[in-house]
Image (tube, rainbow, N blue to C red):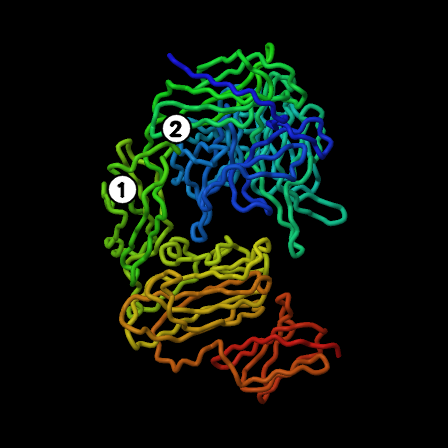
Amino acid sequence: MKKHLLIFVLCVCAAIGVYAQTPTNGEDISRKVNCFVNYNPYVKGHGTGSFYTGDPSQVTLQGALPAEYSIYCGAAANGNYYGMVYLYDNIDGAFAVSFSKIDMTTGHLTEIADWRDKGQFKLQDMTYDYSTSTMYAVGFENGNQQLYTIDLETGTLTWVAEMAQSRAVAIACTYSGDMYGIALMGMLFKIDKTTGGVDGSWQPLRFNEGFEIQTLNSLEFDHTDESLYWSCNAYKFDVSHGNVPTAELIKININDHSYKSLGEFPKKVENDVTLRATVYGLYIPFLTSGFDAPGICTDFTATAGAEGALSSELVWTTPSVTFGGETLETISSVVITRDGVEIATITENVAPATTMTYTDETPTQGNHQYEVYVTSGDKNGAPERRTIYVGFDAPGRVEALTATPEVGCGSIALSWEAPTAGNNNGYYSDENLTYTITRFPDKKVVSQNQAERTFNDKTASSRLLRYSYEVVASNNEGAGAVSTTSGIVSGKAIDIAAGSYTTDFYDAGKRNNEWTTFDANNDLVSWYFCTGMGEKVFLSDFPAAEYILDFAVQEDANDWLISPPMALVKDQKYKLSFECRNNGTDILSVTLGQTNTIEGQTTPIKNEIEIACQAEKVPFAAYFTAPNTDNFCLGFHLTTAYMQGSFLQLTNIVVEETQETGIEENEIDNVRMTQENGSIRIEGDFVSARIIAMNGQVVAEMQAVNGVATSAALTQGIYVVQVIGKNAVKSDKIVVTAY
């Protein structure tokens, strides 16, 4: 066995590993905490990250995940990080994708198990029990919190017990196996791992009488000294301000019940709105040998041999300080392992703050985890790990995958580019590259082993469904990573001649297989469905498509809601009617086109309908004809200006043939409104009117008498006047001055 060792001695400044230079919050030792960063107001993107306990306001992003993926929770076991991966879209919401291993440095996902059959079920937190080598998880199912175990080799999720007593939403195990959990109202319990019940031998710890924990919390022990850390995302009671949102790091001593906040995670105030980072999935590298053991090696890289060669080059810098941050005087040796087996111990020319390299010439083809750590006397230092793929790799995901409905939405065209990387980030060859395409939801392989990078699915036409596709590239090493398209509604068009089309969006299956949404400005805010928000805003609710303003996203709306394809006849007149309710001023346009895409919506039907402060459902209508006999889709395009509207509901859509003259219910022009001495006077051809304050409250309702209606004196302010005619509705704002 021949190994090459090359050592470069280089004096460097003290490298920072698991400790920070200077704590800003009074901590004696500032510990590095790896985590998942779902949102940071100062950093674009999301993925794996880190911060230090000495200053949690500084959170860095290390390995970004693809925009469409995130994780519900994550935890580490023996240096490997695992998480429940999910995908989000506005039709289905968030739904499980996989249980995966996640590279903390690059964010690369390695799927262990396909979890798409779990739908919208989500785990809330995970923890690894080193005493039994078991990964535990907690999640909500069947009306209560449940405790599970996860097999790290197969991804099998196994139910253990119900947690009805504690209702814990975040859990952590000590190194010796004691489990603790945070409950919804801010109570820390000791948990019995076999029954899921509360261990009565430990007195629960209450943090704040007014705590109300939100989603995405995480607990993690630092097993070096068994301090417990909590990334807290909650509302806590404040005497002066009531329930105040917080996102902070809390340190807990489970022995004496003491705890303290170490500071808030990053936050940013914009336009009086506080944007708070979302940090969870904590993982703290630890040493059971204590803080005086050697620290962690830094700048560690592992590089596979070029063009599939079976070798690996390792480069690292030895630590200059102990695990606790004190000066490290001497190093006895450097130990290197591959897949848990020691392959080298270096004792010559080793010293603190030294850059070293090592070449491993005997790895086999496949994934390998390398570990490097130093020893000093009888103490082993903290290990640093890197995983790489050695040898020839299978293909990674195909690039630029698109699926587009063709004219009439009766077939779907796919195109893509060849992968540019290996499935495991290893070296791959595109020689003999072929592709297999599988269609969902019927899981039908529609093409296999094709060399072309395009495919037209003309069989997606018999049923109107939301179809998606998986494309997998293969080479001489086998099948590679899966690339998935978004859902495309395609199939047999709805025949309006056979009867009107109606929907209120209540039926989830129907809307999912008929309607398409687009977030045209990519601000992650778009149309939602049946959220229940109407009850909170108006104290009543009904099924609807809904737009909810996210105050953290300071952009005008640019969002599309597009109907299923409908079979229309040339020169036949059609009527589109719908109802809306909102608490601001929204701008909605209606279009017509031959595909359910933004680009396909080419014909305006009604531009910029203004919907202003409608506390109750108000009817609207538009009339149109088809330019030819074919399949067409209707589009609703919302372009509300930022902060002008915060909540809009759209419901009771009807498309039908009509012989009406085309007087549109949202147009009325022969009405005059004036205000004098605090009263609003309306004159013209109308039936009734309502005056609505800017908070949505109806302050006056009037009937026209001989074409005139006058309100009582109103307080100074801006009002929306809604005038209702026989076949028309009109809304205008008017300013009432002091009387």
Residue 657 picture location, percent across and down = 34, 74
Residue 716, image quadrant: bottom right
Please state which amino acid type lies under the numbered disc 2: Tyr
Helix, strand or loop status at disc 2 = strand
Question: What's the residue at 48%, 58% (across, down)?
Answer: 521
Residue 284 versus residue 523 in the image, above or below: above
Q: Are marks 1 and 2 in contact (CB under 8 Å)?
A: no
Residue 96, image quadrant: top left
Question: What's the residue at 28%, 31% (across, down)?
Answer: 477
Please state which amino acid type lies under the numbered disc 1: Tyr
User: What residue sits right under mark 1 in the picture?
Assistant: 435
Residue 490 picture location, percent across and down = 31, 57
Between residue 213 and residue 366, name the one nearer to us.
366
Quadrant that contains the C terminus: bottom right
Badge number at residue 389: 2
Residue 270 versus residue 59 in the image, above or below: below
Between residue 357 and residue 82, name the one nearer to us.
357
Helix, strand or loop status at disc 1 = strand
Q: CA distance from mark 1 to mark 2?
A: 23 Å
> As drawn, is 253 to the left or to the right of 576?
right
Residue 532 versus residue 248 in the image, above or below: below
Residues packed near mark 1 inside 10 Å, few (<14), some (14 to 19) or many (20 plus): many
Residue 77, visible in the rendered structure: no
> As drawn, is 170 to the left or to the right of 526?
right
Residues packed near mark 2 inside 10 Å, few (<14), some (14 to 19) or many (20 plus): many
